Image: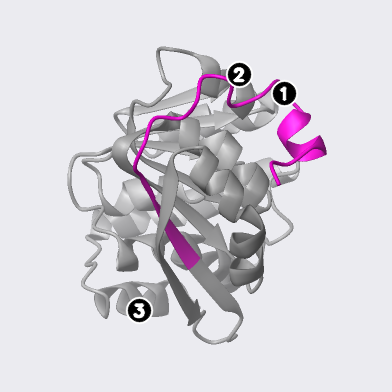
Amino acid sequence: MNPEQFVNALKEHGIELSTYQQEQFSKYFKLLVEWNEKINLTAITEKEEVYLKHFYDCITAAFYFDLDKELQICDVGAGAGFPSIPLKICFPQLNVTIVDSLKKRIGFLNHLASQLELTNVAFYHDRAENFGKNSEFRETFDVVTARAVARMSVLSELCLPLVKKNGVFIAMKGSQAEEELNNGKHAIELLGGETNAVHTFKLPQEDSERSIVIIDKKRKTPKKYPRKAGLPNKEPIE
Protein backbone atom coordinates (compact mmCIF):
# COMPACT_ATOMS: atom_id res chain seq x y z
CA MET A 1 0.00 0.00 0.00
CA ASN A 2 1.74 3.15 -1.18
CA PRO A 3 0.97 6.54 0.45
CA GLU A 4 -1.59 7.42 -2.23
CA GLN A 5 -3.44 4.11 -1.83
CA PHE A 6 -3.31 4.63 1.95
CA VAL A 7 -4.99 8.04 1.64
CA ASN A 8 -7.68 6.62 -0.68
CA ALA A 9 -8.31 3.58 1.52
CA LEU A 10 -8.90 5.83 4.54
CA LYS A 11 -11.16 8.09 2.50
CA GLU A 12 -13.39 5.08 1.78
CA HIS A 13 -13.96 4.89 5.54
CA GLY A 14 -14.72 8.59 5.87
CA ILE A 15 -11.26 9.62 7.10
CA GLU A 16 -9.84 12.40 4.91
CA LEU A 17 -6.21 13.33 5.47
CA SER A 18 -4.99 16.86 4.86
CA THR A 19 -1.65 17.48 3.11
CA TYR A 20 -0.17 18.24 6.54
CA GLN A 21 -1.38 14.91 7.96
CA GLN A 22 0.03 13.07 4.93
CA GLU A 23 3.38 14.77 5.58
CA GLN A 24 3.23 13.67 9.21
CA PHE A 25 2.86 10.03 8.12
CA SER A 26 5.74 10.47 5.67
CA LYS A 27 7.97 11.86 8.46
CA TYR A 28 6.82 9.09 10.79
CA PHE A 29 7.93 6.47 8.28
CA LYS A 30 11.37 8.09 7.82
CA LEU A 31 11.99 8.42 11.56
CA LEU A 32 10.83 4.86 12.20
CA VAL A 33 13.31 3.46 9.67
CA GLU A 34 16.11 5.76 10.85
CA TRP A 35 15.72 4.91 14.55
CA ASN A 36 15.13 1.23 13.79
CA GLU A 37 18.81 0.98 12.87
CA LYS A 38 19.72 1.99 16.44
CA ILE A 39 16.97 0.32 18.45
CA ASN A 40 14.64 -2.54 17.63
CA LEU A 41 11.26 -0.90 16.87
CA THR A 42 9.86 -3.06 14.09
CA ALA A 43 10.69 -5.96 11.78
CA ILE A 44 8.71 -4.20 9.03
CA THR A 45 10.66 -1.44 7.27
CA GLU A 46 9.56 -1.53 3.60
CA LYS A 47 7.55 1.62 2.87
CA GLU A 48 4.47 -0.09 1.39
CA GLU A 49 4.43 -2.63 4.23
CA VAL A 50 4.74 0.04 6.94
CA TYR A 51 1.83 1.97 5.42
CA LEU A 52 -0.33 -1.15 5.27
CA LYS A 53 0.68 -3.28 8.26
CA HIS A 54 1.36 -0.46 10.70
CA PHE A 55 -0.31 2.82 9.72
CA TYR A 56 -3.47 1.52 8.04
CA ASP A 57 -3.78 -1.43 10.42
CA CYS A 58 -3.65 0.89 13.46
CA ILE A 59 -6.34 3.19 12.09
CA THR A 60 -8.81 0.32 11.55
CA ALA A 61 -9.81 0.73 15.21
CA ALA A 62 -11.52 3.98 14.17
CA PHE A 63 -13.64 2.12 11.59
CA TYR A 64 -15.51 0.40 14.44
CA PHE A 65 -15.40 2.94 17.27
CA ASP A 66 -15.91 6.69 17.04
CA LEU A 67 -12.60 8.31 17.93
CA ASP A 68 -13.38 11.62 16.28
CA LYS A 69 -13.91 13.48 19.56
CA GLU A 70 -11.93 14.67 22.55
CA LEU A 71 -11.10 11.47 24.40
CA GLN A 72 -8.47 10.47 26.94
CA ILE A 73 -6.72 7.49 25.40
CA CYS A 74 -4.07 5.25 26.95
CA ASP A 75 -2.02 2.95 24.74
CA VAL A 76 -0.43 0.06 26.63
CA GLY A 77 2.85 -1.34 25.29
CA ALA A 78 2.76 0.91 22.24
CA GLY A 79 6.31 0.15 21.13
CA ALA A 80 6.92 2.45 18.16
CA GLY A 81 3.62 4.27 18.82
CA PHE A 82 1.12 1.73 17.52
CA PRO A 83 -1.85 2.16 17.38
CA SER A 84 -2.12 5.52 19.17
CA ILE A 85 0.19 7.77 17.13
CA PRO A 86 -1.39 6.99 13.72
CA LEU A 87 -4.78 7.55 15.39
CA LYS A 88 -3.56 10.83 16.91
CA ILE A 89 -2.41 12.04 13.48
CA CYS A 90 -5.87 11.29 12.05
CA PHE A 91 -7.73 12.70 15.06
CA PRO A 92 -5.60 15.52 16.51
CA GLN A 93 -8.09 16.30 19.29
CA LEU A 94 -7.31 12.99 21.05
CA ASN A 95 -5.35 13.20 24.32
CA VAL A 96 -2.88 10.33 24.17
CA THR A 97 -0.93 8.67 26.98
CA ILE A 98 1.51 5.90 26.12
CA VAL A 99 3.04 3.54 28.64
CA ASP A 100 5.93 1.32 27.59
CA SER A 101 8.46 -0.65 29.60
CA LEU A 102 11.49 0.13 27.40
CA LYS A 103 13.21 3.46 27.97
CA LYS A 104 14.76 3.59 24.49
CA ARG A 105 11.32 3.34 22.88
CA ILE A 106 10.08 6.21 25.04
CA GLY A 107 13.10 8.20 23.78
CA PHE A 108 12.02 7.51 20.20
CA LEU A 109 8.42 8.51 20.95
CA ASN A 110 9.46 11.82 22.53
CA HIS A 111 11.58 12.63 19.48
CA LEU A 112 8.78 11.55 17.13
CA ALA A 113 6.18 13.70 18.92
CA SER A 114 8.36 16.79 18.70
CA GLN A 115 9.20 16.20 15.01
CA LEU A 116 5.53 15.66 14.14
CA GLU A 117 4.54 18.65 16.30
CA LEU A 118 2.02 16.58 18.26
CA THR A 119 0.36 18.19 21.27
CA ASN A 120 -1.46 16.54 24.20
CA VAL A 121 0.69 13.42 24.14
CA ALA A 122 2.45 12.01 27.22
CA PHE A 123 4.88 9.10 27.44
CA TYR A 124 5.62 7.06 30.55
CA HIS A 125 8.42 4.58 31.03
CA ASP A 126 6.74 2.01 33.26
CA ARG A 127 5.36 -1.50 33.47
CA ALA A 128 1.63 -1.59 32.76
CA GLU A 129 1.07 -3.45 36.06
CA ASN A 130 2.61 -0.59 38.07
CA PHE A 131 0.95 2.08 35.95
CA GLY A 132 -2.48 0.50 36.57
CA LYS A 133 -1.91 0.67 40.33
CA ASN A 134 -1.09 4.40 40.20
CA SER A 135 -4.13 6.31 41.51
CA GLU A 136 -3.30 9.22 39.18
CA PHE A 137 -4.05 7.02 36.16
CA ARG A 138 -6.17 4.12 37.39
CA GLU A 139 -9.69 4.17 35.92
CA THR A 140 -9.21 7.60 34.33
CA PHE A 141 -9.20 6.81 30.58
CA ASP A 142 -12.14 6.83 28.17
CA VAL A 143 -10.38 4.36 25.88
CA VAL A 144 -7.45 2.00 26.45
CA THR A 145 -5.87 0.36 23.41
CA ALA A 146 -3.36 -2.44 22.92
CA ARG A 147 -2.02 -4.00 19.76
CA ALA A 148 0.09 -7.16 19.59
CA VAL A 149 1.04 -7.05 23.28
CA ALA A 150 -0.26 -10.26 24.93
CA ARG A 151 -3.13 -12.74 24.84
CA MET A 152 -6.53 -11.53 26.06
CA SER A 153 -6.41 -13.14 29.52
CA VAL A 154 -3.17 -11.24 30.23
CA LEU A 155 -4.04 -8.10 28.31
CA SER A 156 -7.30 -7.60 30.20
CA GLU A 157 -5.41 -7.43 33.48
CA LEU A 158 -2.98 -4.85 32.06
CA CYS A 159 -5.62 -2.67 30.40
CA LEU A 160 -9.01 -2.86 32.13
CA PRO A 161 -7.78 -1.33 35.43
CA LEU A 162 -6.94 1.84 33.46
CA VAL A 163 -10.37 2.17 31.82
CA LYS A 164 -12.89 4.39 33.60
CA LYS A 165 -16.34 2.97 34.31
CA ASN A 166 -18.42 3.19 31.09
CA GLY A 167 -15.20 3.54 29.07
CA VAL A 168 -13.90 0.95 26.59
CA PHE A 169 -10.92 -1.29 26.08
CA ILE A 170 -10.05 -1.88 22.40
CA ALA A 171 -7.81 -4.87 21.71
CA MET A 172 -6.38 -5.19 18.20
CA LYS A 173 -5.89 -8.83 17.35
CA GLY A 174 -4.99 -11.23 14.56
CA SER A 175 -6.76 -14.45 13.58
CA GLN A 176 -6.76 -15.93 17.12
CA ALA A 177 -9.20 -13.37 18.55
CA GLU A 178 -12.20 -15.65 19.16
CA GLU A 179 -10.11 -18.35 20.82
CA GLU A 180 -8.32 -15.79 22.99
CA LEU A 181 -11.61 -14.21 23.92
CA ASN A 182 -13.03 -17.57 25.04
CA ASN A 183 -9.95 -18.22 27.16
CA GLY A 184 -10.04 -14.70 28.58
CA LYS A 185 -13.77 -14.61 29.36
CA HIS A 186 -13.37 -15.05 33.10
CA ALA A 187 -10.57 -12.48 33.35
CA ILE A 188 -12.61 -9.87 31.44
CA GLU A 189 -15.61 -10.37 33.73
CA LEU A 190 -13.55 -10.42 36.93
CA LEU A 191 -11.85 -7.15 35.99
CA GLY A 192 -15.15 -5.37 35.35
CA GLY A 193 -15.45 -5.79 31.59
CA GLU A 194 -18.07 -7.12 29.21
CA THR A 195 -17.46 -7.98 25.56
CA ASN A 196 -19.41 -5.60 23.38
CA ALA A 197 -18.35 -6.68 19.87
CA VAL A 198 -15.72 -8.46 17.79
CA HIS A 199 -15.21 -6.98 14.32
CA THR A 200 -13.28 -9.33 12.03
CA PHE A 201 -12.00 -8.25 8.62
CA LYS A 202 -9.13 -8.75 6.19
CA LEU A 203 -6.36 -6.26 5.57
CA PRO A 204 -6.52 -5.00 1.97
CA GLN A 205 -3.98 -6.29 -0.55
CA GLU A 206 -2.61 -9.12 1.58
CA ASP A 207 -5.82 -10.57 3.07
CA SER A 208 -4.49 -11.40 6.53
CA GLU A 209 -7.20 -11.59 9.17
CA ARG A 210 -7.60 -8.91 11.85
CA SER A 211 -10.07 -8.42 14.68
CA ILE A 212 -11.01 -5.37 16.70
CA VAL A 213 -12.31 -6.50 20.09
CA ILE A 214 -14.36 -3.90 21.96
CA ILE A 215 -14.89 -4.45 25.67
CA ASP A 216 -17.10 -2.17 27.77
CA LYS A 217 -16.05 -1.36 31.32
CA LYS A 218 -19.19 -2.04 33.35
CA ARG A 219 -17.84 -2.23 36.90
CA LYS A 220 -14.85 -0.98 38.84
CA THR A 221 -11.82 -3.30 38.79
CA PRO A 222 -11.15 -5.01 42.16
CA LYS A 223 -8.28 -3.30 44.00
CA LYS A 224 -5.99 -6.34 43.91
CA TYR A 225 -5.63 -6.07 40.10
CA PRO A 226 -3.32 -5.68 38.30
CA ARG A 227 -1.08 -7.99 40.30
CA LYS A 228 2.63 -7.30 40.58
CA ALA A 229 4.78 -6.95 37.47
CA GLY A 230 5.31 -10.19 35.55
CA LEU A 231 2.61 -12.15 37.37
CA PRO A 232 -0.25 -11.64 34.87
CA ASN A 233 1.89 -13.19 32.15
CA LYS A 234 3.23 -15.99 34.35
CA GLU A 235 -0.09 -16.89 35.93
CA PRO A 236 -2.96 -15.57 33.77
CA ILE A 237 -6.41 -15.36 35.36
CA GLU A 238 -8.18 -18.56 34.35
Of the two numbered discs 3 and 1 on the same chain, state the one appearing first in sequence: 3
| Residue lying at 29% horizontally and 54% vertically, measured from the top left | 90
Please count the marks in the image: 3
Q: Secondary structure at mark 3?
A: helix
Assess whether mark 1 and mark 2 are in contact (beta carbons under 8 angstroms): yes
Could you tell me residue 235's position as x and y percent? 79, 37
Q: Can you see residue 184?
A: yes
The residue carrying pointer 2 sits among few (fewer than 14), some (14 to 19) or many (20 or more) residues within 10 Å by Cα, namely some
* Mark with earlier residue (3, 2): 3
Of residue 154 and residue 111, the one placed in the foreground of this image is 154
Dot label at residue 212: none
| Main SS, magenta residues | loop
The residue singled out by tag 2 in the image is 130
The numbered dot on residue 229 is 1
Label 1 environment density (alpha carbons within 10 Å; few <14, some 14–19, many ≥20): some
Mark 1, secondary structure of its residue = loop
148 magenta-colored: no
Q: Position of residue 209 (x, y in %)?
A: 58, 79
Three-letter amino acid code of the residue under disc 2: Asn
Distance from the alpha carbon under mark 3 to that under mark 1: 40 Å
User: Marks 3 and 2, Cα distance to the nearest angstrom?
Assistant: 38 Å
* Horizontal side of residue 127 vs 14, given as left or right: right
Q: Nearer the viewer, mark 3 or mark 1?
A: 1
Q: Which residue is mark 3?
A: 9
Rendered position, 70 above or below 62: above
Please name the amino acid that badge 1 sits on.
Ala
Asked if the stretch drawn in magenta spans residue 215, the answer is yes
User: Spatial distance from mark 2 to mark 1, Cα to Cα?
Assistant: 7 Å
Q: In the image, which residues are magenta?
A: 212-238
Tell me which residue sits at (39%, 61%) in the image.
Answer: 61
